[in-house]
Amino acid sequence: MFNLFLYKSTILRYLQCIVADDFNIKIDLKNDLRFVKNIVSKKIIIVPFFSDQCTSNIILKNYLGSVITNINYGNITLEDIKKTLSHH
């Protein structure tokens, strides 16, 4: 698994792109996500701190939560993210 913190801006762009594609909205997530070290695994993970822009839309909130979980678990790889971004 890649170091999420090193690719913070890439991950933010990826999330913004997939939200734009799937929900047809533009959203700025830079203040909604934290990149922190897990105290057990010592790996960097993404922790959502969703603002009203996300919490007011439960489908969007659940969608982003699911995508973030898949990134944290390594189910969505850096290669997947770069591939998606290359099509935008």
Image (cartoon, rainbow, N blue to C red):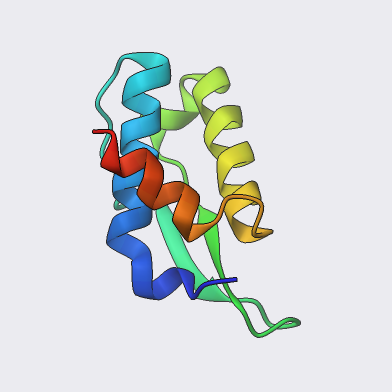
The image shows residue 49 at horizontal and vertical percentages of 48, 50
Q: Is residue 43 above or below residue 12?
A: below
Residue positioned 39% across, 45% down in the render: 83
Residue 48 as seen in the image, left or right of residue 85: right
Residue positioned 42% across, 18% down in the render: 22
The image shows residue 3 at horizontal and vertical percentages of 49, 75
Q: Is residue 81 above or below residue 87?
A: below
The image shows residue 53 at horizontal and vertical percentages of 36, 29
Residue 41 as seen in the image, left or right of residue 54: right
Quarter of the picture holding the C terminus: top left
The image shows residue 78 at horizontal and vertical percentages of 47, 59
Looking at the image, can residue 26 be seen?
yes
In front: 73, or 58? Answer: 73
Q: Residue furthest top?
A: 24
Quarter of the picture holding the N terminus: bottom right
Residue positioned 39% across, 27% down in the render: 19
In front: 51, or 70? Answer: 70
Residue positioned 31% across, 14% down in the render: 24
Looking at the image, can residue 32 be seen?
no
Residue 20 as seen in the image, left or right of residue 38: left
Picture quarter containing residue 17? top left
Residue 77 as seen in the image, left or right of residue 53: right
